[in-house]
Image: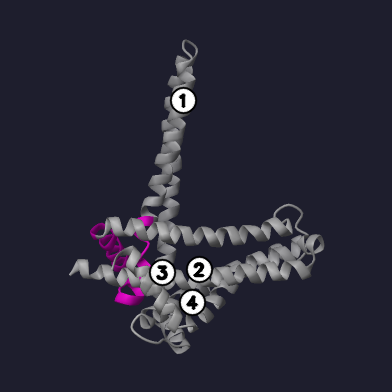
Amino acid sequence: MGATSALSTTGRTLKRNTALFAAAFVLTVISLAPSGVNALLPPVMAGLVSLLLSGVSLFVTPFFMGGLLSMADEGLSGTTRLGTFVRGGKANYVRLLGAMVLFGVLLTVVGFVVLVVGAVVGAVVFGISAGAAGQSLAGSGVSVVFLVLLVLLGALAFLLPVFVFQFYAAAVVVSDLGIVDSFKRSAAVVRRNLVSTLGYTVVVTAAGLVTGVASASVSLFTGYGTSGTAATEVGVAVLVPILLAVALVSTVVSAFGSVYQVAFYEDCLDSLA
C-alpha cells in the first residue's frame, strides 16, 4: 500500500465511519481539558484542577487509544460502531498503559544520556576551542559549527526511538501482542519498510503540526502562560469558540491519525511474512 496509498484508504474509511470522529472527539476533549481549565480559571485554582486532569488523562488515554485503534481496524474492512470502541478500550487497556509507561521511561533515559554525553563532549571540545580562539579567529567559528552539529546529533538520537517504536500501539491492538513484543514488532515493521515509514512519518508530522498550530492559537488569544487571567482578557464569549475550533481540528487529526496508522501498519505486516 505505501504511505501515499494508505491516505486514500484512510479517507474512504473515515467517510463511511463517522463514528470514528465521535470517539476521537471524546479523546480530544480529555486531552485539551487541562489547557481549557488554565485559560478559564484563576491561576491558583487552574493549576490544581489542571494537575488533577492531567493525572486523569494519563490513566484514561490508553483506554481511548485502544478503543479508537480498534474502531480503525474494524472500519478498514467495513463499518465500525462505538461498541467496538468500548470493547477495544477494555481489552487493550493494561498492555497499552504498560507500553506507554515503558515508552516514556525509554525516552527519559535516552534524553538524559543525550544531555550528559552532549555536556561532556561539549565541555571538552569547547575547552580546546577556547585555547585555539586566543590564537585564531577560526577557533570561535569551529565552536559554533560543533555546537550546531552536537544539537542536531542529540535531536536525532532522541527522535530515533520515537521513529522506530511509533507503531507499538497498533501492534498491541491489531496484532494482539504483549508490551515487549509490540516494540519488537514496531522495530521490525520500520526496518523492513524504512522508506515508506519515512513518508508516513512526514505525513503524520504535518498533521501534528496542524494540531500544534491550532493549540498555540489558544495561548495567543488567551494570553495563557503570561497573566493566567485569560477569561478576563478576551472574554468567555471569544475563548469558548476558539477552544471549540481547536477541538474540532484536533478531532479530525486524531481520527485521521488513528486510521492512517492502522492502515499503514496492516499493509506493512505483509513484509514480515
Which label's residue is closer to the chain start, 4 or 1? Answer: 4
**Label 3: which secondary element:** helix
Q: Nearer the viewer, mark 4 or mark 2?
A: 2
Q: Which mark is residue 253?
A: 2
Residue at 75 percent across and 61 percent down: it is 44
Q: CA distance from mark 2 to mark 3?
A: 25 Å
Relative to 151, 189 lies left or right: left
Confirm or deny contact between disc 4 and disc 2 (CB under 8 A).
no
Q: CA distance from mark 4 to mark 1?
A: 47 Å
Which label's residue is closer to the chain start, 4 or 3? Answer: 4
Q: CA distance from mark 1 to mark 3?
A: 42 Å
| Amino acid type, label 4 | Phe
Which label's residue is closer to the chain start, 2 or 3? Answer: 3
Q: Which mark is residue 64?
A: 4
Q: Nearer the viewer, mark 1 or mark 3?
A: 1
> Vertically, is 29 above or below 218?
below
| Amino acid type, label 2 | Val
Q: What residue span does the magenta drawing correspond to? A: 163-192
Residue beneath label 3, please?
A: 98
Q: Which mark is residue 143?
A: 1
Residue 164 included in the magenta stretch of the image: yes
| Amino acid type, label 3 | Gly
